[in-house]
Amino acid sequence: MFSPKLPSILSRIPILNSNHNSLPPGAKIFFAPGFVASLAIALVVVILQQWGSLQPLELRIFDLLVRLQPSQKLDPRLLIVTITEADLKTQGWPLSDEILAETLTQLQQHQPHVIGIDLYRDLAHPPGTEKLIRQLQAENIVAITNLGVPRIPSPPNIPPERIGFNDVPVDPDGVIRRQLLFASTDEETLFSLSLQLALFYLKTQGIEAQNYSGNSNYMQLGNGVFIPLKAGNGGYTAIDDQGYQILLNYRQPQIAETLSIGEVLAGQFNPSLVRDRVVLIGATAPSLKDSFLTPYSAAASHDVMMPGVFVHAQMVSNIMSVALNDFGFNQRQNFWQSPRLFWFLPLGLEPLWIWGWAIIGGIITWQIRHPVKQAITLSIVLMGLFAIGYGLFIFKGWLPLIAPGLAFILTSISVIAYKQVYYLSHDSLTRLPNRSTFLHRIEGEIYRSRWQNRLCGVLFLNVDRFKVINDSLGHQAGDQLLVDLVHRLKTCVRTSDVIARLSADEFAILIENLRQPQNAIWVAERIQQALILPFFLQGQEVFRTMSIGIALNDSTDMSAEDLLRNANTAMYQARSQGTGSYQVFEQKMNVDGKQHLQLETDLRLALQRQEFVLYYQPLISLKTGKVIGLEALIRWEHPQRDLLFPNEFMSVAKETGLIIPMGQWVIREACHQLKEIQDRFGDLELIMGVNLSGRQFSQPDLVEQIHDIILESGIDPRYLRLEICESVVMKDVDETIALLQQLKALNVRLSIDDFGTGFSSLSSLNRFPIDTLKIDRSFISQMEAEGEGENFGIVQTIITLAHVLKLAVIAEGVETAKQVEQLRTLGSEFAQGYYFLRPVPADIVIAFIESEPCW
């Protein structure tokens, strides 16, 4: 027989007795923002949980899980005899002792296992009192008492082993989720009605209560060990856990078959409903108000309250099912359908359960940047938390869900907020300081270096030709390159040095506590050495270099802006010397930089003020010796610096993008000039040559621009020749061919300029829809001096190649009669250069054409 060793009914057990701040010895913790946030928030949530603030929500989730779990069939071991409103009308209330005695007589005729009377009979209600007393003496009758204040006694002359209390523990929200099996006072141990009835039934199955061998304070019934529920188990934190309580495992709202007392008295029932069953008699009439809220109440549209006798039946079924490990019907049951008592996480592990979900929330929001992806992932994980909770609940595991969910959400929000603040001062891709933060760090280091009489340096780094990566491999590959690049940069500097990202392809490094200026140069050399190895992007080896500018705070009045600007100026100087080089700032660079900035400003104004003009150089036919065309060349009539040639401003135009509007203007002006010449000279078929820059050639609407200009000027497009540099057309052969074909469809002529200086593929050259090849002047200028040397041979090869491809040849840069003779001998069709005429304004070239020169 089970002998409970329980504290007094007035004693209480602490809710939680664990140290949440203890860590395993030697644990190595990295205090990353997400980790710190998760730890702090988990601690706050645990405190809120222990205060009971989260219990109402946890209980709501428990009720939802109860309603969602698979329902079982009616318990065939039980029968509930109800007292309905109809019975009250016919029999009155309270029921007379005679009516109750007759009911017991009718039931006893069909041999029930045990009958539990959930009705108070401490007072006699004649007539029939003597008859009822005789019926209550039956060995299978269990009556009730109530432990409330004042206590309601059981019927007289019934031994204690056939008395059970009908008290049920009610949660703060009024819902029945627990059952009290027994309670102890200093004088006696009292069993509940449900436990007494279950013990009667189980005794016929050979099962009696006994102390569990693993812990003598626990009761064991058959296969079930009934571990008492304590504050802190599952979602509970603030409950009265006096006595021996367990969590009630509801079977379904309708627990068993029912008969009304009227039906029993009339004998209108099948005797098999009674035979060998546990019979409970109780009131179900709503007017008697013996009903309780249950987990099913929140979703019920009617019958929100469950009668007390049904609640006791749930408890009896729960105890018997656990003890017998079945639900009372003979059929195979799935593993997840096996009856069990609820189990809970050990109290010391609940904080870790909560903290774990907080860490997950922090990791997700730290790693995922896109807000939509963040929201979707967080939602999926929250649903995963509920799914885990539901899955464990099916196996009777009740874990807190609100606490970990709240920790998860709050950590996610805090990390998102931190990232928003963090990225105000840091780059979102590389997580390096941005320009404003970097300048602040420079200011601090300059201040310290003045007081400590030391140097600091700034390296300004630009990734050479970074746009090529984005254009060819995509922006994702470009981002990956930058991340990999930052990793290499970190290996080249000390941990005290600061690396920052200033723009898309620009970085800077603050080198603190420089002992000598040479150290800054050594850092630059280490960086260049680190870039020798290739980067691997999308399965390809990619080599990148960086142009580096170095500046030192060698002046007492230097600001952070000055130091960074000087390094930037030095970087531009390094880039002008070729990719992969570095340059130390010198004061004269500031002058050059200011001149560069002034030139850029003047260039922008020149477009507005129409300061650009076109000069023209004639194209001569070497067969007839006559002028057969012109080449339009831009000049800038600068208001202070007189006439500027392209080599003085074209690099700035390319850097600033002004070359695009300048190029459009050149084509439009040249076409209008061609129209004027055609109208003036009638049948003279002059061809106008215009250069297209690489930036113009990459414009998506280039064909539309030229088409509009042709229509606007009214020229015959056959007399417009567009010249493209060899290096431009060879960048992307397939795209170039497609674009050239579109231009060719306008009926214009096409020429490859500066031929021989690039890396043309003969197979590609054969596919280009071009008309002429223009030999670069560098080969022409050396022919006369070498005789029939190397450059002569190159020119001869180009001309032969062009003729094989059925292309005409233009030789530019012709300056002597000897060169003209050589080119005629080699078969070049056309020539231009200073020998014939320098580039001149339109009025002079028109007068030149009118003079009808011939060579």
Image (tube, rainbow, N blue to C red):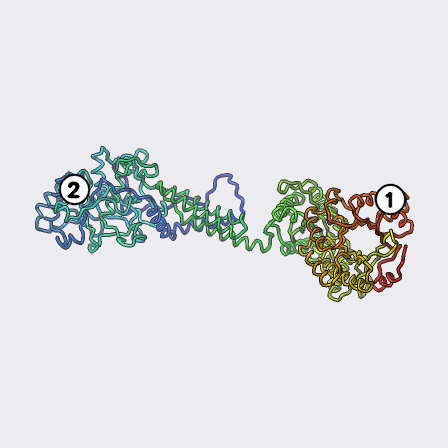
In what quadrant of the picture does the N terminus appear? Answer: top left
Residue 70 vertical placement versus 686 (above, below): above
**Of callouts 2 and 1, the N-terminal one:** 2
Say how many tags the image has: 2
Q: For numbered disc 2, what is the local secondary structure?
A: loop
Q: Nearer the viewer, residue 688 or 348?
A: 688
Q: Nearer the viewer, residue 140 or 105?
A: 105
Residue pictured at 75% horizontal, 67% vertical: 609
Position in image of residue 308 (x %, y %): 23, 49
Label number found at residue 270: 2
- Whether residue 321 is visible here, answered yes or no, is yes
Name the residue carrying label 1.
792
Label number found at residue 623: none
Residue pictured at 72% horizontal, 49% vertical: 548
Q: Residue furthest front?
A: 683
Foreground disc of the pair 2, 1: 1
Q: Nearer the viewer, residue 333 or 395?
A: 333
Left or right: residue 851 compared with residue 632: right
Position in image of residue 519 (x %, y %): 72, 46
Q: Amino acid at mark 1?
A: Phe
Q: Amino acid at mark 2?
A: Asn
Crowd class of label 1 (few under 14; some 14 to 19; many from 20; radius 10 Å): many
Q: For numbered disc 1, what is the local secondary structure?
A: helix
Crowd class of label 2 (few under 14; some 14 to 19; many from 20; radius 10 Å): few
> What is the distance, in whole Å, between disc 2 and disc 1 at their CAs?
122 Å
Position in image of residue 350 (x %, y %): 41, 44
Left or right: residue 427 compared with residue 633: left
